[in-house]
Amino acid sequence: MTIVHDQAGTWLREAGAAARAAAAALARAGAAARDAALRAAAAALRANRAGILAANEADLAGFSGTDAFRDRLALTPERIEAMARGLEEIAALPDPLARVLAEWTRPNGLRIQRIPQPIGVIGMIYESRPNVGADAAGICLKSGNAVILRGGSESFASAGAIQAAIAAGLAEAGLPASSVQVAPGTDRAYVAAMLAGAGAIDLIIPRGGRGLVERVQAEARVPVLAHAEGLCHTYVHAAAEPAMARRVLANAKMRRTGICGATETLLIDAAIAPSLLPLLVADLAALGCTFRADARARAIVPSLPPADAADFDTEWLDAILSVKVVDGPDAALAHIARHGSEHTDAIITEDAAVAERFLADLDSAVGIWNASTQFCDGGEFGFGAEIGIATGRVHARGPVGPEQLTTFRYVVRGSGQIRP
């Protein structure tokens, strides 16, 4: 084990130095070169589709988890095409570095500008979904950052095949292949090395379950941009349009149950629950969903299984929905504040005043009115992709795209001024 840890530490020092040099080259290269690399990487993903799918099949052959997590791990030709399109969409975005954030002139004539700059070297630790590596690489390249990736052991072969395609695109565009690197093994020592990588890595982004995020936050010696679990709620208000509520909830829960934007808890207003809850349950049950319900919901639909004390604190990532009847928006907000993860929460209502108050009082990174929680995704926000959904209170919050992976600095221009 000592040998593995020594190897991991040596790898991180070397990878960090190469990434630091690559980040400087990316910043010097300019937006046109970075965008060309993204388009070349997209082409390489398409050209290497067969190899990526073969690597993914190898990962799937060794996987023994739930169907929902298998879906997170699985790649298809359509998902590879979506990765490639995502890189092209990122390339088409405005350059996040070619902006002036603020400017002013002081009474002494000094002209001051606040301008963006890349963070530097990003460390990304993620689980299951291989496409996360491509998204992270694209967003980092667009914003002039180098990235060191460590995917889950279950997706090791897939992650390596994707990174190889992106490296080919970088080489074609004349940019350093070390702009995007992956850990060379599945041993957790590589995670430990990244968490201890102050000086080599400027920012760590974890993307995965509660256990991963909590470990990163507890052990990191590098600043962390936290991505909490997605314990998302949909609140169906008394003034909801029933057909809309049925359509939106079915999508919010069942479109893809294993993603962080999937609704995990239905909160339904007591005034509308007797008429609408049986229909919502029937819709979802027909799609394969099961339930955990409070006593008031079970009084309306007796066949619902009872919820226990932990169910409303559980991110299911599966075809399971917690159900609770509440007395109005204040009760819904109180439940979300107590049990939610400040990720994404939605209200379904035709009452604009209630909706606006709900959105104003909600403390989550993303609040949604009359739409599925599964829209909490960087691609759907127009970012091309995302590196995660930040739920912390420092720096970015919500979907993290290229603009959110920049910091800023100041440029001061004078005409000979001296300080008295």
Image (cartoon, rainbow, N blue to C red):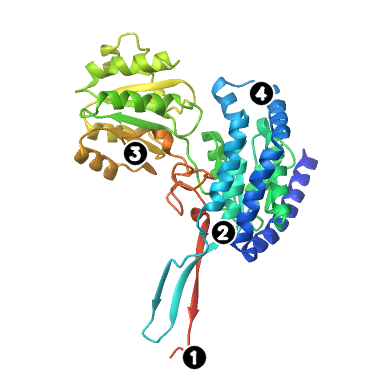
Among the two numbered marks 2 and 1 on one chain, the one whose residue lies closer to the N terminus: 2
**Residue 137 point in image, percent of width and height:** 62, 48
Which label belongs to residue 63? 4
Q: Around disc 3, counting alpha carbons within 10 Å, would you say few (fewer than 14), some (14 to 19), or many (20 or more)?
A: some
Among the two numbered marks 3 and 2 on one chain, the one whose residue lies closer to the N terminus: 2
**Residue 377 point in image, percent of width and height:** 46, 40
Q: Which residue is mark 2?
A: 119
**Dot 1: what SS?**
loop
Quadrant the C terminus occupies: bottom left
Q: CA distance from mark 4 to mark 1?
A: 67 Å
**Residue 331 point in image, percent of width and height:** 25, 31
Q: Quick one: which residue is furthest to the top in this view?
A: 303
Q: Is residue 163 visible?
A: no
Q: Which residue is mark 3?
A: 368
- Residue 332 falls left or right of residue 344: left
Among the two numbered marks 3 and 1 on one chain, the one whose residue lies closer to the N terminus: 3
Which label belongs to residue 416? 1
Among the two numbered marks 3 and 4 on one chain, the one whose residue lies closer to the N terminus: 4
Q: Which three-letter amino acid code belongs to the residue tagged 2?
A: Ile
Q: Around disc 4, counting alpha carbons within 10 Å, would you say few (fewer than 14), some (14 to 19), or many (20 or more)?
A: some
**Residue 54 point in image, percent of width and height:** 72, 29
- Residue 341 falls left or right of residue 2: left
Q: Which three-letter amino acid code belongs to the residue tagged 1?
A: Gly
Which label belongs to residue 134? none
Q: CA distance from mark 3 to mark 1?
A: 52 Å
